[in-house]
Image (cartoon, rainbow, N blue to C red):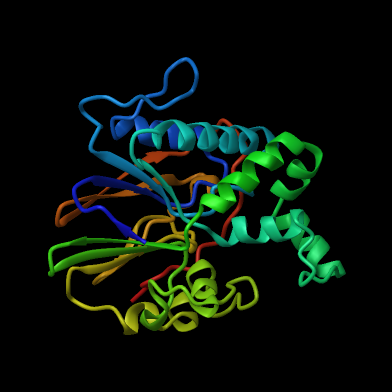
Amino acid sequence: MILPSNYEYIVIGDVHGCIDELKSLLAKQGFKTNHENLLQITPQNKNKSIVLLGDFIDKASDEKLKETIEFIYSNYKHLNQERKRFYLIRGNHEAMVYRYITNDPTLITTPKTIRDKEKYYNTVALLEKEPNLKKLFLELYKECSVWYKYIYQEHFSVTLTHAPCQEKYLAKDDITSQKKMIKCVSRSKNPNISLDELLPYTHQEAKDNQHYHIFGHLSQPNIRQYKNRICIDTSAIYGDTLSCAIIKEDNISFDSTPFEFKQKKGEQTYNLLFDF
């Protein structure tokens, strides 16, 4: 999916139910909410668009997850009335929650999948007891794309996916490539291996050029960049920050907002990416 190059893009990392931080970060970028919780379009932000990089659900409290889904749903409808201003990328959490709530026949129920659902995918239980919220989520899920690409002249481009992946899978629409862009090798299954060993392609394929790949998925204490590879999941739900990359013409800048402690933060032991 190619993004129009005549707009500025605010690309936001893994939200995971951090709705207060999401609103604060958007306000810093010129998008303030009105009394109906809708983001206002103004002369100052009319040429800006928003991209959520996936994993806007799970890990947070039920209250904040509900607020997050409702906020994204109402503003997705609101901002996209005149032109597309709000884009959603599918993360592994959206993909897995969708499988659970639609009773995907390929998802075998075992003691482990039951434990994983409770530990990692707590949105499932919320949606199962709130059918109206489930309906909103299913509509949003259908609107999610696996990748977007921004191209500004020949020398500058940015590919956006939820997870890092090898170049051969980037911006491809076959089933294998889509799976690779949504989720990489599991860290939880390989706890004693560094990310740079587990995902060697993230640095081995990195280049000193301006054809960037921005992704989230790998919760980090700060934005991690090596050459043209950039991870912007800065662990908001773990008490750090919610970050964004701002793409304007042939330039990328960054901004963030701190965790606001309006819900309980999660616990995380960081396995640093690009830890050379």
Residue 201 quadrant: bottom left
Indicate left or right for 44 with 66 as reference: left
- Examine the rendered structure and indicate whether residue 8 appears above or below residue 117: above
Q: Quadrant of the N terminus?
A: bottom left
User: At x 31% / y 42%, what residue is drawn?
Assistant: 49
Total numbered labels placed on residues in the image: 0
- Examine the rendered structure and indicate whether residue 176 appears above or below residue 30: below
Residue reaching furthest to the top:
35
Q: Quadrant of the C terminus?
A: bottom left
Counting from the top left corner in percent of width and height, residue 69 is at: 59, 38
User: At x 23% / y 78%, what residue is drawn?
Assistant: 207
Indicate left or right for 238 with 201 as reference: right
Counting from the top left corner in percent of width and height, residue 108 is at: 82, 71
User: At x 18% / y 48%, what residue is drawn?
Assistant: 6
Closer to us: 242 or 73? 73
Counting from the top left corner in percent of width and height, residue 133 is at: 69, 37
Can residue 260 be seen here? The reply is no
User: At x 47% / y 75%, what residue is drawn?
Assistant: 195
Counting from the top left corner in percent of width and height, residue 13 is at: 43, 51
Can residue 4 be seen here? The reply is yes
